[in-house]
Image (spheres, grey):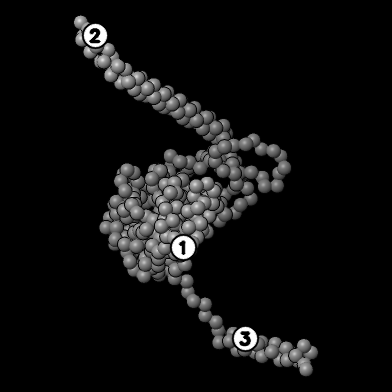
């Protein structure tokens, strides 16, 4: 009997921590379920508030339809229809067949008197435009505020900027060319010199592991990154001593600091214009349905989505991108023959004046 009682007591003692653990797990699960329910309720309330705000903002407004564009605006002299007729072909050429889906994302525009001092009601949706804008300025406003259809968070995060029509076609590749020749990164310079693997690294379309070593190849680059960009961040707390070691040219210290940064904090070697240009190249290569293929599978890697959009392998697409960037090299400034003669003449004139000055007399 005593043996049976002892075994029962031992079993109770052994199972009590498990019961406590199960109880803790149940409480945490209930807490998580409660938070999820609260979040869903908040999201629902936010959606309702947004819908009500849209109804309030568009009450009494007219709708202008041009192609896939829908513009909800108040009556005013603003030339919205003429601007939409100019903007639609440009938008359609970028998004292709997906441009028809823009009807789901209408513009909400309130045209306002730019000279009035009367207080207006505050609207939290849409945009305000002065009603004295001309057709060109209004067209620019439509092109720079269009909502790209079906953009998912992964694509938006990789791009770093909204994919919209380029106002001046040559400006973007010219800006990327300047990045390739001036960025303080050996990887970027390797891309400029024709290393396609380096191009894929700095465009962030290759393997995402070990980006620090692939983006900032040399110890000097990593030291500059720490001491110039993140010096204030690492100067406090437990990293201050490691920062001092990094300033003493200890690459292990610099690397350790950079590896401790929160995910996504490491600066990209190329700005967003380079990735936007790569997407534009993929859309040009892939035809009318290229954009639909780009956004069709949001869970796929960016590299696979770009290849699908362009209907070619990624290396070939990156080669086309690089060739386009190199072709946008800014033209050298050429001076007419008389400019050199004028420069020599003015130099001689000012030199003669300097010699005549009393400062140079003995």
The answer to whether one can see residue 121 in this image is yes
Q: Earlier in the sequence, mark 1 or mark 2?
A: 2
Picture quadrant of residue 105: top left
The residue beneath circle 2 is: 5
For the point 49% across and 62% down, the residue is 248
- Observer-nearest of 112 and 176: 176
Q: Give the mark nearest the N terminus, 2 or 3.
A: 2
The vertical placement of 96 against 322, above or below, is: above
Residue 91 at x, y = what percent? 44, 52
1 vs 2, front mark: 2
Residue 131: image x %, image y %? Answer: 62, 47
Query: Mark 1 or 3 closer to N-term?
Result: 1
Q: Give the distance between the C-alpha atoms of the residues marked 1 and 3, in whole angstroms.
A: 47 Å
Query: Residue 343, which numbered label?
Result: 3
Q: Secondary structure at mark 3?
A: helix
Is 183 located above or below residue 113 in the figure? Answer: below
């Amino acid at each position: 009997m005593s043996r049976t009682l002892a075994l029962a007591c031992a079993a109770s003692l052994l199972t009590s921590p498990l019961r406590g653990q199960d109880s803790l797990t149940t409480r945490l699960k209930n807490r998580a379920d409660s938070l999820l329910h609260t979040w869903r309720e908040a999201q629902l309330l936010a959606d309702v508030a947004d819908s009500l705000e849209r109804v309030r903002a568009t009450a009494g407004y007219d709708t202008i339809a041009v192609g896939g564009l829908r513009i909800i605006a108040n009556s005013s002299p603003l030339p919205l229809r003429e601007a939409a007729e100019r903007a639609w072909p440009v938008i359609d050429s970028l998004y292709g067949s997906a441009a028809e889906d823009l009807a789901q994302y209408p513009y909400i525009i309130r045209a306002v008197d730019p000279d009035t001092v009367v207080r207006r009601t505050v609207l939290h949706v849409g945009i305000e435009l002065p009603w004295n804008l001309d057709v060109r300025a209004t067209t620019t406003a439509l092109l720079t505020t269009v909502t790209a259809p079906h953009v998912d968070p992964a694509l938006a995060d990789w791009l770093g900027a909204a994919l919209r029509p380029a106002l001046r076609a040559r400006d973007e590749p010219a800006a990327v060319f300047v990045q390739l020749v001036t960025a303080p990164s050996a990887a970027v310079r390797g891309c400029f010199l024709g290393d396609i693997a380096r191009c894929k690294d700095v465009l962030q379309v290759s393997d995402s592991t070990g980006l620090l070593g692939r983006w900032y190849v040399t110890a000097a680059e990593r030291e500059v990154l720490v001491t110039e960009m993140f010096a204030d961040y690492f100067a406090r707390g437990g990293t201050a001593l490691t920062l001092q070691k990094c300033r003493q040219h200890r690459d292990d210290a610099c690397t350790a600091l950079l590896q401790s940064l929160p995910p996504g904090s490491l600066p990209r070697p190329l700005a967003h214009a380079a990735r936007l240009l790569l997407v534009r190249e993929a859309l040009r290569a892939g035809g009318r349905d290229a954009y639909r293929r780009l956004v069709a599978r949001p869970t796929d890697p960016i590299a696979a989505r770009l290849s699908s959009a362009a209907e070619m392998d990624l290396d070939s697409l990156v080669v086309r991108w690089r060739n386009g960037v190199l072709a946008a090299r800014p033209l050298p400034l050429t001076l007419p023959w008389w400019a050199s003669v004028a420069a020599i003449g003015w130099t001689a004139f000012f030199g003669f004046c300097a010699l005549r000055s009393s400062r140079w007399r003995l």
